[in-house]
Amino acid sequence: MYHKNRKNCGHMGPPGTIGEIRMKKLLLASTRYMSEFFTVNAGDAARSGLNEESADSGIKDIGVSGDLTYGFTESWSVTGLAAYTRLLGDAEDSPVVDDRGDENQLFAGVLVNFRW
């Protein structure tokens, strides 16, 4: 019963069990945020060769993510993470994304966990 008092801290089952979390997201961004990361002003365009573009507030992206944790012992577990995000609106249309990046954003990782 090592997990009895460990609520909301990841894998809570006995060794040899798997815990899973799936999440969906929709991210809205302010004009300030969108401008910082997706606007290309005249100076930026001259330095980078990208076209000028002004990004406004709105829906920035949608995505899904999940993780899977397997407990080996009471203290040791391993977690696999994966996420997919699709940029939308002005973020997707920005020359930073169109010319140099990708509107499809992927992430994956593996963690080794120790709990004492």
Image (cartoon, grey):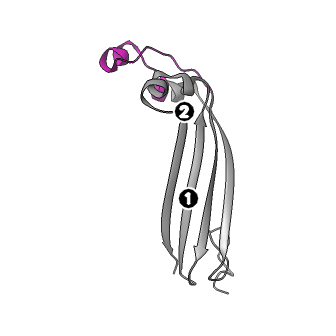
Going by the numbered disc 2, the residue's amino acid type is Glu
Q: Is residue 64 above or below residue 50?
A: below
Q: Where residue 29 sits: x, y (%)?
A: 60, 31
Asked whether 86 falls inside the magenta stretch, the response is no
Q: Which stretch appears magenta? A: 36-58
Crowd around label 2: few <14 · some 14–19 · many ≥20 (10 Å) = some
Residue matched to label 2: 103
Q: Where residue 9 sits: x, y (%)?
A: 62, 69
Residue matched to label 1: 81
Badges 1 and 2: C-beta atoms under 8 Å apart? no
View extreme (bottom): residue? 1
Q: Residue at x 61, y 29 (%)?
A: 88
Going by the numbered disc 1, the residue's amino acid type is Leu
Asked whether 57 falls inside the magenta stretch, the response is yes
Q: Is residue 70 above or below residue 52?
A: below
* Disc 1 from disc 2: Cα separation: 20 Å
View extreme (left): residue? 47
Q: Residue at x 53, y 27 (%)?
A: 34
Crowd around label 1: few <14 · some 14–19 · many ≥20 (10 Å) = some
